[in-house]
Image (cartoon, rainbow, N blue to C red):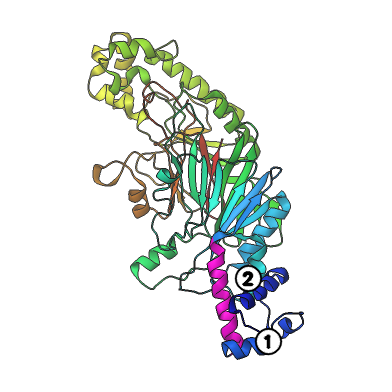
Amino acid sequence: MSINRQEIIDEYNTLCSLANKRLTRTEYRNYDTKYSSTTIESIWGSWSDFVEEADAEILINRYNLVKVFKKNTNKIVITSVNDGSEINEKFFNTLLNYCSYNKAELGILWGKSLKRNKTFDAETFALLQPYLATRFEFKRDKDCIAQDFLIPSTQKNPLLNLDKLSTDIKTIIVGSNKQYLQVLPYKQYSAYRIACSTGTLSLPQYKDTVAGHIDSKYHKFGAILLEWNEEHNRYVIRNLVYNNDKLYDLNICYSENNVEKEDMIPAMILGDLHLPDQDDVALDKTEKIIDKLSPEYVMLHDVASWNSVCHHNFGKCLFNAQNLNDSNSTLEKEFRVVRDTLNSFTNRHKDVKFRIVNSNHDNFIEKWLDTGEFVKDKQNAIIGAKLFIKYCNGQNIFDNCLNDNIEFLPKNESFNICGVELSEHGDGGVSGALGSPNAYNKTFESSVVGHTHSCMIREKTIYVGTLSELIVNYNQKGMTTWIHANAIVHKNGEVQLILI
């Protein structure tokens, strides 16, 4: 009988796949096979040498392992794993519990090993095999893909160059030990585009170097939830993070064997408001989320646009004529709209503590007063003179005008909830420079900021989006990354973005 080594390996791997485990020599002998274990050992020298080569064959074949989720799949959870790694079994079991409770399907992107040709042991492979693939396709949303691109576990930014790769894809998910997220450039007349990396099941296994310690710090036991949204006609994503043996999603806490509803979440951070330029639909959805989640604190960024005194628009006659209207043509009108909207908003949620974060748009009035422009501004000169005195005395335009459950955060004071810094708007950086994820990652262990109108997860810094209209008077040309998105802080110190 002629011997075909590849045929032997293929037969063995097929049997292992059917059994959902790596077969031992004794188990292999229970099958009616073309080649006996004795023949295999005579060819390879030992059973262990044969299994090692068969495992290497799996390593090769995994690159084309595609699984398809059917059209009727409403919820899908995607995470990743490094081939041959030890896994966080508590997190894996928690994900299974989460999927069971939410009737979601689980997929695991099968990433390359950190060490050459290292593969899973038989027990780990048996656990993971039903969920493993290198690419997932979605029959219900063909503009969404999830794929392992062999991104190294030590790559600083796993989303690098995805904006160029995925110009025809609306949602792209890649396997990585880090959990990143960013909105990709898109035109306002089309649907938003977004890229994210999953987080992982794998335990950290980095070198004992500065770079290795940084990789370990940003190693994230996490996953991405895809939830079908009829209104947007697409899967909308939400990041899931496991920490301190808990996984939180909205107001529900999951562990290996338990599901428990939370009566209150610690904090919710809203996208920049920019009254009176708010998007009413986005704001209404946000209020419903507040009703559902019952946050103790709600953080507000850029509560007003202050178009009537915006220094960017001084001297722009045509621009002001075209864009100023009944709600913002004077500071008095704009103030009344903002005040009434804030009071109505906070009245609806009387048990919530609202905190206004010092923001760049809120400082427009100070700039207007500081430069003396209010003296030249005929329609706003009188209110400007009154405000000049108030601001000189350490007050602001809203003093004694807002409900008792809304307060301004003092400048340059920490406001930390569950280890997450919430006092920064996102406009200020290091030594007078502009704010950036790099600046905040060097300063805080974890923080949530606003300002950019584009939600993002970058290491330990999370950006919310905006609740303003997505097209306003100063962003009508070119592309955009603006998106409606809020964030919530959970009791385990992890932050979850909520796209609306």
> Residue 90 appears at what percent x and percent y?
63, 66
Asked whether the viewer can see residue 255, the reply is no
Where is mark 2, residue-wise?
A: 125
Q: Nearer the viewer, residue 284 or 131?
A: 131
Q: Nearer the viewer, residue 301 or 238?
A: 238
Q: What residue is drawn where x is 68% and y is 54%?
A: 98
Where is mark 1, residue-wise?
A: 37
453 in magenta: no
Q: Please state if 247 lies on the left or on the right of 472 as rendered.
A: right
Residue 479's mark? none
Crowding at mark 1 (Cα within 10 Å: few <14, some 14-19, many 20+): some
Q: What residue is drawn where x is 63% and y is 75%?
A: 7
Q: What secondary structure predominates along the stretch shown in magenta?
A: helix
Which span is picked out in magenta?
Answer: 46-63
Q: Nearer the viewer, residue 129 or 207?
A: 129
Q: Secondary structure at mark 1?
A: helix
> Residue 245 appears at what percent x and percent y?
60, 62
Crowding at mark 2 (Cα within 10 Å: few <14, some 14-19, many 20+): some
Q: In the image, what residue type sits under mark 2?
A: Phe
Q: Secondary structure at mark 2?
A: helix
> Residue 437 appears at what percent x and percent y?
37, 48
